[in-house]
Image (tube, helix red, strand yellow):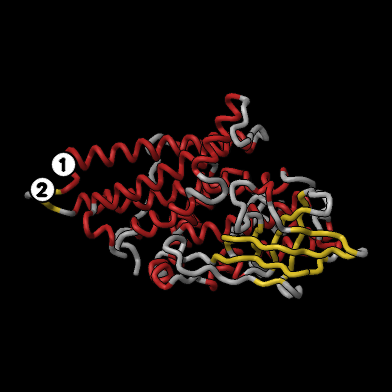
Amino acid sequence: MANRYAASFRGFDYLNIDEQLSDEQKLIRESIRNWINASVVPIIESCAEKNEFPKHLIQELGKIGAFGPHIPEEYGGGGLDAISYGLIMQELERGDSGIRSCASVQSSLVMYPIWKFGSEAQKQKYLPKLASGELLGSFGLTEPNHGSDPSSMETRLVNRNGKYYLNGSKMWITNAPMCDIAIVWAKNEDKKVIGCIVEREMPGFSTPSINGKWSLRASATGELLFEDVEIPEENILPLANGLKAPLSCLSSARFGISFGVLGAAMDCLHHAVEYSKERTQFGKPLASFQLTQKKIAEMLTELSKAQLLSFQVGNLYNANKITPAQISMAKRNNVEMALNTARVCRQICGAMGITQEFPFMRHAMNLESVITYEGTHDVHLLITGMDITGINAFS
């Protein structure tokens, strides 16, 4: 079932940000938007209801350039700038957070660390197949006992008699149940964080699904379990030394999220505005009431501020001047804005807002996860607080 007004979606650009975009960036956004309308909108409500990820879209995501758009072309990526990457994430999340999460993990948490910390042989072996969707990856950092505190991870990758063995578990992992490879972070015998590439067929590696989710239902979520998995030395990321390596991957993903949630917010606002103009109460459209206009104007204002924040962060990213704390600010602010927008839009549409004719409840449930994963709402506050005061409140 397609959402009622999905076909007429044009986005929002109240402050004329489009004037700063290149023709190529606009074309990229339009092509992804068209793909979402054709391939995602007609099926996503059913996928969410059934708690199923649409696996047939994986290779399509590769074909449209949604996997590794910011990875160099020589390795199969798009070689695009940060804002182009952000616009792709924006349009994907307008379809569903689960679709964007799949592409975000593949691009920023699987391809990015191989490109940044891998050997040339690893780049040549994995990146082109990941870019095309022939391979799907996952990223193992969070553990059952350690989420916001990854430095306390218990997973171990140790050298025994000249061979490397991986033991431990990772939890809440996007793409896990269907991944072909996993980028896994563990501590070695010196308790130093290192990364490795685990392949599906390696003995001792399993990926059970996590069921019973009310959020990200159209996303495949699971665990990564390792029982004496033998890791060849050529699968260890040679340049990943210390916790800063996986955290840099999270910064790339968080940047994409800050753009992605703009799409979810715009989708909700578009449906609420269109419905309010058609729905009549007390002899006139809902849109003519002052309280309705107040809600719409406030949501548009917050959306516009969030857009400016993401685009400026994108400009800093392109200029190699970005900091992780600036990305944290954008991720935290924009997810909160999108979640609030979904809730208010549902209120505008009354009881109809809880049905599958509208995307509000699906986006709101998804955003309850997005506001937690890759740095919780409060953790991002503390990152900004530490940056501005110079005092670490984590310890």
Count of numbered badges drawn on the protein: 2
Quadrant housing residue 77 = bottom right
Relative side of 69 to 98, left or right: right
Q: Residues within 10 Å of mark 2 (few under 14, many from 20)?
A: few
Q: Which mark is residue 189?
A: none
x and y percentages locating residue 130 in the rendered image: 68, 63
Relative side of 351 to 133, left or right: left
Q: Residue furthest right?
A: 161
Name the amino acid type tagged 2: Lys
Q: Compared to 27, does 51 lie above or below?
A: below
The residue under label 2 is 284
Give how far apart the Cα atoms at labels 1 and 2 are: 8 Å
Q: Compared to 370, does 59 lie above or below?
A: below
On the rendered image, what quadrant is the C terminus found in?
top right
Residue at the image point whose x is 36% and y is 45% from the top:
340
Q: Residue 289 carries which label?
A: 1
On the rendered image, what quadrant is the N terminus found in?
bottom left
Mark 1 residue element? loop
x and y percentages locating residue 285 in the rendered image: 15, 48
